Amino acid sequence: MIQGLVGLSLSAGGLTGCSRLGMSTGPALNGSPETTRIRVHDSLSLCQTPQYVVEELLRAEGFTDVQYVQLDTTSGADAVYSAFATGEIDVSMAFAGPFIMQVDQGAPVVLLGGVHVGCFEVFGNDSVRAILDLKGKIVGVTGIGSAPHLFLASVAAYIGLDPRVDINWLGHRLADSATILTDGTVDALISIPPVPQELRAKKIGQVILNSSLDKPWSQYFCCTLAANRDWAQQHPVAAKAALRAILKATDICANEPERVAQHMVDGGFTPNYDYALQTLKDIPYDRWREYELVTRCGSSPCGCTRSG
């Protein structure tokens, strides 16, 4: 089935983004990548679905050795970001916030491009109806300093809370999200797919913030494609090929959610087809072109192109 998905990506519809942005549509116009190996993070988050559709697209770009690297994230999501800096991961998707902090600190990380907006959702119990209600409450995050923690802390600070003293943060395992919100261990939590889909399906809590829908958070890239800086500098054609493949995969997610959800289940990436399908429909995978142009032009989409 994945070959059929690749066929869709290589059709005119799948190549629209590359041509609109002035990017060539295949390795023939750019030369073969300087390396045939590429290492991608094996993530548990369904919002990073393009990474699991992209393998055959990467092979079409000339990568013959596509590796999915599993990391020990029991101590939080920091392991993912440090793996970029150490070179354990070559290219992968993740939330932009920690990358910005890494770059500011001089870590060897480079951002190649935005992939999609939104994927964080904040759920609260009956005592939490808005972000301001988090003051004095216990809020669950997958780890202190993790991407969800940094995102919600920035939201809290934006509306006048001091996330360091006004909120009591509690680290927890992703799999325990439904339990700790139901039994009152936390008053609220922030999470990523498939947890929001599970909470809604089980009617647990209420959504007080959805970064796919609520401005200004829905106006910024969430997951971006990043690379180890040394790898990207040594392999510029490979870096561009990886970005092109990921954006084609993102178009597949937008255009064929049912087939992609089934691929995720058949490939063993997730056991729940319904949660996978709902994630693909909840996240606006079809808006990366619009946000790419806004980011680069500093205005509304204007039809301009960028050089390859």
Image (spheres, rainbow, N blue to C red):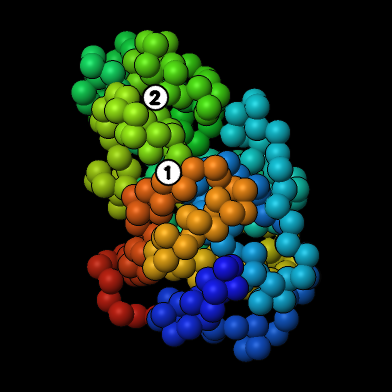
Q: Position of residue 151 (x, y in %)?
A: 41, 35
Where residue 290 sits in the image (x, y, percent)? 33, 67
Q: Position of residue 107 (x, y in %)?
A: 65, 45
Q: Which mark is residue 275?
A: 1
Q: CA distance from mark 1 to mark 2?
A: 19 Å
Which residue is nearer to you in this view: 134 or 49? 49
Q: Earlier in the sequence, mark 1 or mark 2?
A: 2
Report helix, strand or loop for mark 1. Answer: helix
Camera-side residue of 9 and 273: 273
Residue 162 visible, this orientation: no
Q: Position of residue 172 (x, y in %)?
A: 53, 20
Tell me if residue 98 can be seen: yes
Indicate left or right for 282 with 253 as reference.
left
Q: Residues within 10 Å of mark 2 (few under 14, many from 20)?
A: many
Label at residue 92: none
Q: Alpha-carbon neighbours of circle 1 within 10 Å: few (<14), some, or many (≥20)?
A: many
Which residue occupies 70% across, 65% down?
233
Q: Residue furthest bottom?
A: 29
**Is 166 drawn above or below residue 226 in the view shown?**
above
